[in-house]
Amino acid sequence: MPTLSTCTWSVSVFIIICLVCVQLNLSERYATQERDMMNSALLAPFHESPSDKNYLASSLQQRVGIIARPTGSPNEKFIIIVDAGSSGSRLRIFSNDLCKIALLSQPGENCETGEVLSSYASNPSKVGESLEPLIKQAKSVIPFDKHGSTTLYLKATGAMRLLQAQQAQDILKEVRQYLGDGERCPFTFGSAEIISGEEEAIFGFIGVNSLLQQNERVDSLQGVIDVGSTHLQIAYMPSSDIRDHEFLVYLNSERTSVYAKSYSRFGQDQAIMRAMEALALKFPQHENIDHPCMLRGSDETLTFGDRQISFTGTGNAPECSELARSILHTDYECLMPPCALMGEHMTPVMGEFTAIDGAYHTVAGIGLVTAAKGAPTPAEIEKKTE
């Protein structure tokens, strides 16, 4: 899989997508904290929720704190979320002592693993073992007498959504068996499932805005662009009616309509791969192909079907921009204007956006995100990559 060595290409894709934004607020801490807030939204057992399926737990109205260890209170309850993403699985442990949601596990050693669930598609019987380090860490954090009353949930995202249905089912079956085995996992197993891209976008929107309001006292809600490894998510609250991709959530006790859309294979790694696939189709007889979006002099060899192709970077910005636009498929028929990518309707964009995950790392990699400079504009990003 191509890496960030091809950052010129990654930036080009991001430029085109973010040109619709008024301003971008890129922050590394939101890339991690947003996921923690997203996970805290899944803590339904800690709250009484209306029957409305669009309701998200009121934990999002509370401050999420990070504490080093359990409080020791007899009333303290715990819940575990395993965030099975496209670059690995992450452990997050929450406590609800004193009616607050507190994050006990922090990013770092023993709380994250580079094992990706989807990589076990050809050998699903081994997938459960990849979660063993996370279970071991959870056991060390949560008091022994609370193990049985602690519920564990696993939520899989982008990479699992790309698998064939049977492959995904086989992996989830093994995960459920492993986590439901009391000998291997002493916690109460809740569920293991793949969440939709739109659901992931909504959790990101709620998480980022909750953090902004808590840490920076931002009054207006910001849109969120999440550039993951496999998918790209966008969510925001427009001023006009939402005619498609509308989701209802509760923020600050108010019912709010949010536009949320996920684009499959528009994430950073998959976009890079799709660009190479496009070049391979454009030059069907070539074994060596110049890649305008790779850094000049870099090279990468990949196999497409029965073809082994060597790509050599030329660092040609105009040609890279043309290639990027070609795989956005803006030429597709738009049946309900306005449309953004692939002929998909998109409610008119307004306001400020916060860009996270791959968006942050890509722009930070070219030196545009610093405490002194603040958030760069799309125009500044485009100029930097020319």
Image (cartoon, helix red, strand yellow):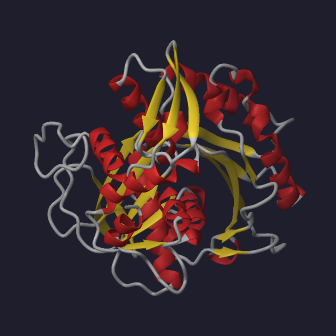
Residue 152: image location, x then y, percent: 69, 48
Q: Is residue 58 visible?
A: no
Locate residue 146, reporting x and y percent: 82, 57
Which of 14 and 93 lies nearest the eye of the viewer? 14
Q: Is residue 20 above or below residue 166?
A: below
- State the residue at coordinates (49%, 45%): 294
Quarter of the figure with residue 201: bottom left
Residue at x 35% of width, y 68% of height: 383
The quadrant of the image that shows the C terminus is bottom left
- Spot the residue most to the top: 306
Figure check: 118 above or below 342: above
Q: Tell me: 178 left or right of 213.
A: right
User: Viewer-proximal residue, 263 or 39?
Assistant: 263
Q: Position of residue 177 (x, y in %)?
A: 72, 29
Q: Position of residue 33 (x, y in %)?
A: 59, 67
The residue lying at 84 percent from left, 72 percent from top is 72
Q: Is residue 305 above or below residue 212?
A: above
Horizontal relation, residue 59 to residue 66: left or right: left
- Dividing the picture into quadrants, the one containing residue 343 is top left
